[in-house]
Amino acid sequence: MKQRNLLGPASIVLFLVYMFLPILATYVFSIAVRWDRSILPEGLTLDWYRTAFQDRWFLIVFRHSITISAASVLVSTLLVVPTAYWVHLRLPRARPLLNLITTLPFAIPAVVLALGLIKLYGQGPLQLARTPPMLVLAYVIFTLPFMYRPVASSLEAIDIRRLTEASQSLGASWVRTLVEVIFPNILPGILSGGLLVFATIFGEFTLATLLVGARYKTFPMQLVYYTRRDGRIASAYSVISFTVAWATSLIILWITTWGTRRSSGRRSPVGRAGGGAPAGGKA
Amino acid sequence: MSLRRKTDRTRKPSTAWWNWLPIIPFLVITLGIMVLPLAFMLEGSFQSKEGFFTLENYLSMTAPVYTQSFRNSILLSGITAILGTILGTTVGYFVYRLRSSRARELVVTLCDVTSNFSGAPLAFAFIVILGSNGVVTLALSNYLGWKIYPTFSIYSFWGLVLAYTYFQLPLMVLLVLPAVAGLKQEWREAALSLGADARSYWRYIGLPILAPAILANLLLLFANAFGAYATAYTLTGSRFNLVTLQLGSLLTGEVLRDPGAGDAMGILTLLLMGMTILLYQLASRRARRWRE
């Protein structure tokens, strides 16, 4: 009995140390004058951030990453929400197909997807495979599970049939029904799916570097570049990446709790309502 | 659930062909970005450089450089999946037993957040703590006189194991919590009242019930690690021989271009991933039997 009382807290504490140590160390490293000769940092400074921000590449890669992530979220929303709505409402026969399609990306490593895209679209003078729009489309496919699942579970939580019939009996068109009735009702699902897609793509390195590479440098590409050249600047980049990742996770969590509370009045016992799916392949 | 929804329907959904029209954009993009590229890859894997049918590309996979990359990838994914499963199940169990639901929710939130930390920034964080001048490296050598370099290196296989386990572990905790929560208190009480001790409760009841769920999650972790690229690339460049790194350097032209071999390697990877996910589905279907 005594032994178990110790084993539980000990394993949780060790787990917390393992989870926090690398992240905290990176945060401290990014504001340390020097931290490679002694246990404690030799003074604190914001110089590495200043250096990172002053580099003209910083704004460029940041803008590129924001652009690609936002474009992918937009395309994904426009593609997934109407499709999911229509299939749930009028085409239940297509649901197994939709489930299959939105699960498959888990089984396709990013490297393999990049290989296939370059094989099919890499030839010819246009080099379509190596353009930002192709990267956006690849991301839309790559993040389908993250977008579809929260949207589908939101659709299942409301009575879309009744809402649609009510809206149409009042004379609204399909598009108007979708935009003004369905969309607001499944907004928590769309938001949490969209944010997860955004965060995933903002930190995504593999597809970006293998498809477009130096033609359109993104934030993670520049981070990897600095890990080989200047650890200080790499640490500033890493801290920004981590901050974006945990901030989005917390917002998603807040939205899903708020969404489930609003729709059912209770919370699932282990949290994580519809928001997260295993982050396959992102590493 | 879906059964009840069906009987609720007053109007039978129409099955006319034009009902498929609104989802055509979705199907076209899926076809163009996911299905066709992989289909062309399959075709390419059976094609010689001159465009004739051949099995040469698959036979070339027996070359040491390719067998080694598959062996390394399977070992790395296998070891980190097993480590993640054992540690994650243990942590998950103790998290479930926590008395305060607030503490439990905090750990779940933490896992939610940390399982999203991966790729380049995570790899760099491990360089910060365990690189040759890393914080932990220095602490161990200064206070304990334990110089981990050059026996250990964050840029080596075991360094990768450590970094991969970082994103496997919280994922496992998240995956295992619902399964552990499904263990009914009455089963435990019944076993204990029949004279079982805690050890034999786990040996004969707890673990056998959890086994399918644990196996399913183990397979998911394996697939998760096998497809990973950015973490390994940031830590080792293309020096370490993994399947994904090998495919990546084929794409960036770092090695002699042999498209057929690349296609064959891609198809073998897909087969391995597909089989793993299929087994995962079977195991998790079995695991769901206990959750009624």
Image (cartoon, rainbow, N blue to C red):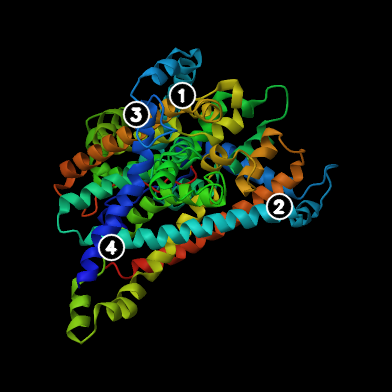
- Are marks 3 and 2 in one subunit? no
Tag 1 and tag 4, C-beta contact below 8 Å: no
**Residue type (three-letter) at the residue carrying disc 3:** Val
* Mark 4 → mark 3, Cα distance in angstroms: 48 Å
Q: Nearer the viewer, mark 1 or mark 2?
A: 1
Which residue is denoted by mark 3 in the rendering? Answer: A175
Q: Nearer the viewer, mark 3 or mark 1?
A: 1
Q: Element under label 3? A: helix
Residue at mark 3: chain: A
**Residue type (three-letter) at the residue carrying disc 2:** Tyr
Tag 1 and tag 2, C-beta contact below 8 Å: no
Q: Tell me, for residue A233, which label it has, or none.
A: 1
* Mark 1 → mark 4, Cα distance in angstroms: 40 Å
**Residue type (three-letter) at the residue carrying disc 1:** Ile
**Residue at 43% in and 30% down:** A202
Q: Element under label 2? A: helix
Quadrant of the rendered structure where residue A152 is?
Answer: top left
- Are marks 4 and 2 in one subunit? yes
Q: Is residue B241 left or right of A65 when viewed as pictured?
A: right
Q: Tell me, for residue B93, which label it has, or none.
A: 4
Q: Position of residue B131 (x, y in %)?
A: 49, 40
